[in-house]
Image (cartoon, helix red, strand yellow):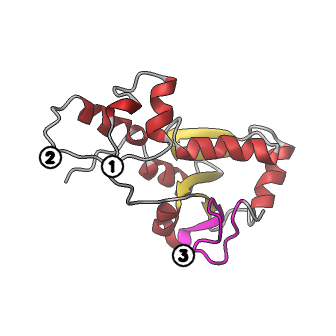
Amino acid sequence: IQYRAGAGGAAAWSQLNRMPADGYTIVGTNIPHVLLQPMQRNVGYETEDISTVYWFHYTPNALVVTSDSPFETLDDLVVAAKKAPGATTSSGSGTNGANHLAQQRFDALAGITTTYIPFRGTGGANTAILGKQVAAGWTYTTGALQLGDKARVLAVATEERHPKFPDVPTFKEL
């Protein structure tokens, strides 16, 4: 097993695309990355090149801040973003992936403008949150769990509250 971090999955998928189809080499994919990335630019693969065998993993987006952030609620972040359009920054794992799409959709629904800072992967994006290089961060519920008590989850992108974050509201609730 090899972990190929980078570009929201594109690094691994383009590498797989250059390898012979031997029936033994497999890679995990995630939506919307595998769909959006090739639509935007040449990333070394096309969506049609990848055959999905099994969907085994679901990691919803979560919007997080440091535990000492002045943003105690999602509304606090929205108010700040309305006062200074574009000044509220958020990290995420790459461009044209789930985090970026969540930020774009959230901005549209909340009627705000935030600035998305893409990183080469979730690790860098989460480090930017903890290092206070950004005001907030789009990560996944698994990433939020890894951040532990160093971060506060403002909302999760699930239909119902996430069992690991029972006190955190969903975006839909808010």
Dot 1 amino acid type? Gly
* Disc ID at residue 133: none
Q: Residue at x 70, y 69 (%)?
A: 169
Q: Is residue 80 magenta?
A: no
Rendered position, 65 above or below 10: below
Q: Nearer the viewer, mark 2 or mark 3?
A: 2
Q: Secondary structure at mark 2?
A: loop
Amino acid carrying label 2: it is Tyr
User: Which of the two discs, 3 and 1, labels the residue nearer the N terminus?
Assistant: 1
Q: Which residues are magenta?
A: 149-171
Residue depicted at 80% across the width and 38% down the height: 85
**Disc 2 from disc 3: Cα separation:** 35 Å
Q: Which residue is mark 3?
A: 164
Q: Closer to the observer: label 1 or label 2?
A: 2
Q: Give the labeled residue for mark 1.
A: 28
Gap in angstroms between the C-alphas marked 3 and 1 = 24 Å
On the image, the x and y values in percent for residue 73 come to 75, 65
Instruction: Using the numbered discs, state the Cα–Cα distance from disc 1 to disc 2 in whole angstroms.
Output: 13 Å
